[in-house]
Amino acid sequence: MRIWHPTRQTFVLLHRWTGLAIAFFLVVASLTGTLLAFEDELEVWLAPQLHVALPASGKATDAMLDPYTLRERVEQALGPKVRISQLMLRPEPGRTLAFTPDPAIDPATQRPYQLGYNQILVNPYTGAIQGVRDLNKISIRPENLMPFLFRIHHSMALPRIPGALLMGLVSVLWTIDCFVGAYLTWPRGRPFFTKWKPAWLVKWQAGFYRVNLDLHRALGLWCWLMLLLFAWSSVMFNLREQVFEPVMATVLPFDNSWRGQPALREPLAQMPMTWPQAHAAARKAMQQFASEHAMQIDAEERLSFDRRRGLFAYMVHSSLDLRPHVGNTGVLIDARTGELRGHWLPTGDVSGNTFSNWIGALHMGHVFGLPWRIFITFIGLFITVVSVTGVIVWWKKRRAKSTVRR
């Protein structure tokens, strides 16, 4: 039986057609990503009426409402169609708090009310609602622009499942193409590094075609590790269960207790505990969990009620967090018994979870402060250049072949 061995030309064709198939999506995702690296700052600049919160007296020293009072005021202001299933425990001075509405059940249809929005921006000093918005809305109005750019970046503004599948496929192809592209730069002669060196350089004095080709190849090599980071982390965001974890689980262990809790047969209509009781139970579970994992709790973030799974999710900022000012350490407790049902640790957990959290934080610019966000902005521009120069290389070769045929 004859075994087929791929030739170099096979990899050339694979690189060419894969690159052409994903070039448009990479350019769009890269350019939107350069803006999303500064999402918080741009949100405040574009829509200060939604994000800047001032005390009624205008004095910055005024106290904010306690979490229980704030939650009740928001729920009362929105009326019987909405339930607020979060306690926001760490308000930021001068900024609004973002609540996610939980639609109540319409007694006439036995279905959740259609609200027309999925985010509520609230003044933590007064409890006043400064605005609501639909994060899925396709709009370039200032207050909707950044959520719209995020949807384009994540899923080309398509519905959730088709968008995730599309960008997940693009990310898988991009990951494969990273290795194919690097292989095609490898020299076929010796000495290896002497022959490989020209692939890392751009002959600026040459003609347009040669400079374009050198830019495509050299930028791809200099940025190769970052290209692979963004490609594989994009697979994680879009196809975590289908592709990312099955591949990574061959070398790294994962703990899926946070995502793996099953849904109840029927969502809980009422909370089995009051908010103070749930808060106390969550604190107790977190303190015990922290002592077992030798971590320090710095601040509380929020407490959320998940009716579908019958759980409370309690988030804090801990010594194991990657982000300096946003906590992503969490425990899940049973809404009826208060027993621990799952956890999420940014670092210090099983290696698969830690690896996933690190590449996700690097992708989104959540670590190393402003210098890293500036760096990934340039990487986004470089990815755009690599994609565009690759298309130009194909177009030039195509025109040359057409001329020869004629």
Image: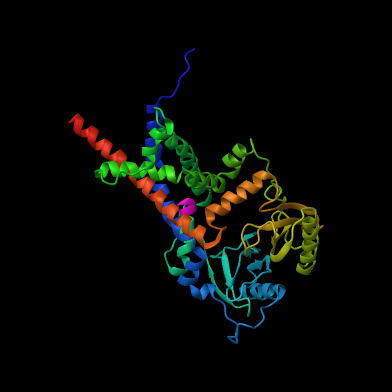
399 is within the stretch colored magenta:
no
Front-most of residues 132 and 398: 398
Front-most of residues 27 and 145: 27
- In percent of width and height, residue 229 lies at 52, 46
- In percent of width and height, residue 37 lies at 49, 59
Relative placement, left or right, of 214 versus 333 is: left
Front-most of residues 89 and 141: 89
Q: Check the image and report above or below for 51 versus 29.
A: below
154 is within the stretch colored magenta:
yes
What secondary structure prevails in the magenta region?
A: helix
Residue at x-position 77% and y-position 53%: 293
Relative placement, left or right, of 222 versus 280 is: left
Residue at x-position 46% and y-position 43%: 224
Magenta-highlighted residues = 153-157
What residue occupies the far left of the structure in this picture? Answer: 406
Relative placement, left or right, of 198 versus 404 is: right
The C terminus - image quarter: top left
- In this orientation, does residue 137 appear? no
Residue at x-position 64% and y-position 38%: 249
